[in-house]
Image: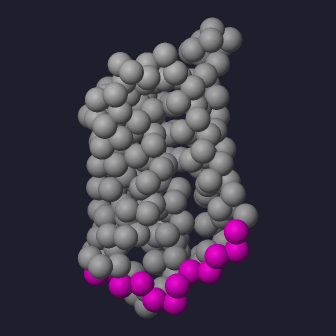
Amino acid sequence: MNFFELFILAVALSMDAFAVAICIGLSMQKVSIKKALIVGLYFGIFQAVMPLIGYFTTTLFADKIVVYGYWIAFGLLAIVGGKLIFESFKKEECKDEYSLSITQMLPLAFATSIDALAVGASFAFIQVNIIPAVLLIGITTLIISILGVKIGSLFGSRFKSKAQLIGGIILLLIGLRILLEHYGIISF
């Protein structure tokens, strides 16, 4: 997986965090860089740690399932992408008020990074250099989440479903590319 593909994947993975960050921005009376940075750090750290956990957990069992690795990578990305696409059509309202307390932010950060766990598992099968990958995912999510808070405070929730839809399509396309490349149908 080259840098550009990894960056696109990082952007796609950050779309859940972006959508929640928009809601957080909507609920804030006044958005400061400190508050936006706190949101970005929660989401960025979790988005970086979860693929690392998925990668190392999967590598423990990779020798037993390596024959199906490309199908597993495709399946995981297709499931996560499909979930994002499905969620983009749901009419969810943002909460009236979010606090940046650890008790509220940890569950949000965890929930928005579950898909990154599955992507990390797929990284083990396609032999991605994991440390640069998770750093790129974490930093990208950090920046996009900060932007989400700011956009939420300025424009409202109309970008949330579009972000999830685009993220889901990107993940599906990456999974399909992995599968097609494995079978020699395409090459990059």
Q: Which residues are magenta?
A: 90-101
Total tally of numbered discs in the picture: 0
Picture quadrant of residue 105: bottom left
Overall secondary structure of the magenta section: loop
Picture quadrant of residue 154: bottom right
Q: Residue at x 60, y 45 (%)?
A: 79
Please indicate, yes or no, whether residue 127 appears anywhere in the rendered image.
no
Of the 4 image quadrants, the one containing the C terminus is top right
Residue 21 drawn at (x, y percent): 46, 70
Q: Residue at x 48, y 23 (%)?
A: 69
Foreground of the two, 5 or 61: 61
Say if 41 sits above or below 186 in the image. below
Q: Residue at x 50, y 40 (%)?
A: 9
Q: Is residue 169 left or right of residue 109?
A: right
Q: Residue at x 38, y 28 (%)?
A: 124
Foreground of the two, 61 or 158: 61
Q: Is residue 109 left or right of residue 60?
A: right
> Furthest-front residue in view?
64
Please indicate, yes or no, whether residue 43 appears anywhere in the rendered image.
yes
Residue 177 drawn at (x, y percent): 61, 25
Foreground of the two, 184 or 53: 53
Say if 162 sits above or below 73 in the image. below
Residue 101 drawn at (x, y percent): 28, 81
The verdict on residue 6 being magenta is no
The verdict on residue 99 being magenta is yes
Residue 181 drawn at (x, y percent): 59, 16
User: What colour scheme does the image use?
Assistant: one colour
Foreground of the two, 103 or 97: 103
> Furthest-right residue in view?
89
